[in-house]
Amino acid sequence: MTHSSGHHGHMPTLQELETKSGRTPEKIRVGLQELVEKNYIEWKPGTPTESTLILEGWERDDPAGKVSQAGTQKPQQITTPGNMDYWQYY
């Protein structure tokens, strides 16, 4: 959603989210509701997805440390001189 709003200049429609994610409208709504509950977006169920307001566009760091929910270690970002970070991480 963040990419679509920044790159295309609009929030994606439900049809666009279906096409790009391969999920059903119901699963998309459940996912949106979860993002609302975690305060990543503002969206009222029953309104078009185009009315969504992004509050936080990226995942938050894991407060428990370097272990993700799946129990694997998160990759550590290595800083390199020059602009190599751009090509390797973005």
Image: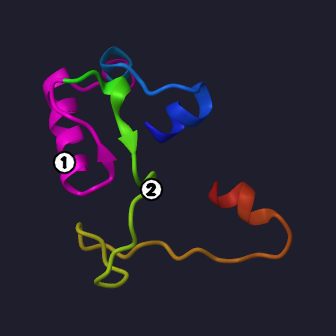
Label 1: few (<14), some or many (≥20) within 10 Å?
few
> Relative to 88, is 19 above or below?
above
Q: Nearer the viewer, residue 78 or 46?
A: 46
Q: Which mark is residue 34?
A: 1
Q: Earlier in the sequence, mark 2 or mark 1?
A: 1
> Residue flagged by tag 2: what amino acid is it?
Trp
> Relative to 17, is 70 above or below?
below
Label 1, secondary structure: give it: helix
> Residue flagged by tag 1: what amino acid is it?
Glu
Q: Which residue is mark 2?
A: 58
Describe residue 85's horizontal placement relative to residue 40 as left or right.
right
Q: Residue at x 48, y 72 (%)?
A: 75
Tell me the magenta residue range.
Answer: 18-46
Q: Residue furthest top?
A: 15
Q: Quadrant of the C terminus?
A: bottom right
Total marks placed = 2
Q: Quadrant of the N terminus?
A: top left
Q: Residue furthest right?
A: 82
Residue 56 is covered by the magenta coloring: no
Q: Residue at x 34, y 34 (%)?
A: 52
Dots 2 and 1: beta carbons under 8 Å? no
Describe residue 56's horizontal placement relative to residue 79 as left or right.
left
Label 2: few (<14), some or many (≥20) within 10 Å?
few
> Relative to 9, is 55 above or below?
below
Q: Residue at x 15, y 37 (%)?
A: 30
Q: Which mark is residue 7?
A: none
Residue 20 is covered by the magenta coloring: yes
Q: Quadrant of residue 87?
A: bottom right
Q: What percent of the width, then of the height, locates residue 61?
A: 39, 72
Q: What percent of the width, then of the height, locates residue 86?
A: 73, 58
